[in-house]
Image: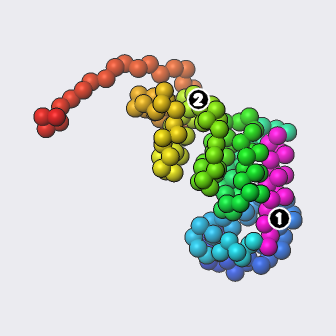
Amino acid sequence: RGIKDSLELTRMLLPEILANLNDSVFVEAVYDVISEMIDSNIVKLDEIAPYKKIFLKQAGYKLASVRNDPDNWYGSQFWLSFLSKWNDKENNDLIREFLQLPGLGVKRHAIHALLKNGQAVPASEILLLAKDTLMRYLLYSDLVALKKESLMPAAFATQKSISESELYYYASDENDIQSINYLGEQVEDLNGK
């Protein structure tokens, strides 16, 4: 956490950070910091472009790790966000490989990264997330943020369906939710309308 406290101070360490990117343990600890510095305009993407191959190699290690153990997906979301900063064939192809992994969490972040880069995503992958009660709300929120909510499958784009998923998302954080029962709806007039 300390290295993120002051991105401006961390910026001064950038040459040393970049010099140690071949260390897979080290890069896991700093790539998201570099990503935040790029997002904050403290570091320009061009400055780290000479290290792009190393980042691709390290992201490939993460991909292989998740392929071997799907439960090891955490951290993929940060790699996918980082990879999406380079909107080019090489990075988008690697993001597509993450999309092929079985876990819904990693699929969600891969879909977001690809759509952010203007890349096509198979409707079947979006449908897979929309069908999942937990993922539906997160997917819809991502699509709204990207102004691509029209990609949400119509059967799951209803207020009822999104609300069910949102309720499940927040309630399941602390509880084991067995089911959510729809009780009904009530329409009220507001100012005579």
Q: In this view, does 94 lie above or below 105?
A: below
Q: In this view, does 34 lie above or below 119?
A: below
Q: Position of residue 28 (x, y in %)?
A: 77, 58
Residue sitting at x 52%, y 40%: 151
User: What type is the residue that disc 1 sits on?
Assistant: Lys
Q: Where is residue 145 in the image (x, y as percent from the top left)?
A: 49, 50
Q: Give the range drawn in magenta.
A: 50-67
Which numbered marker is on residue 66? none
* Quarter of the image with the N terminus in it: bottom right
The answer to whether any part of residue 52 appears in the image is: yes
The residue beneath circle 2 is 132
Residue sitting at x 67%, y 60%: 87
Q: Position of residue 165 (x, y in %)?
A: 49, 31
The answer to whether any part of residue 171 appears in the image is: no
User: What type is the residue that disc 2 sits on?
Assistant: Asp
Q: In the image, is 115 to the left or to the right of 21?
A: left
The residue beneath circle 1 is 53
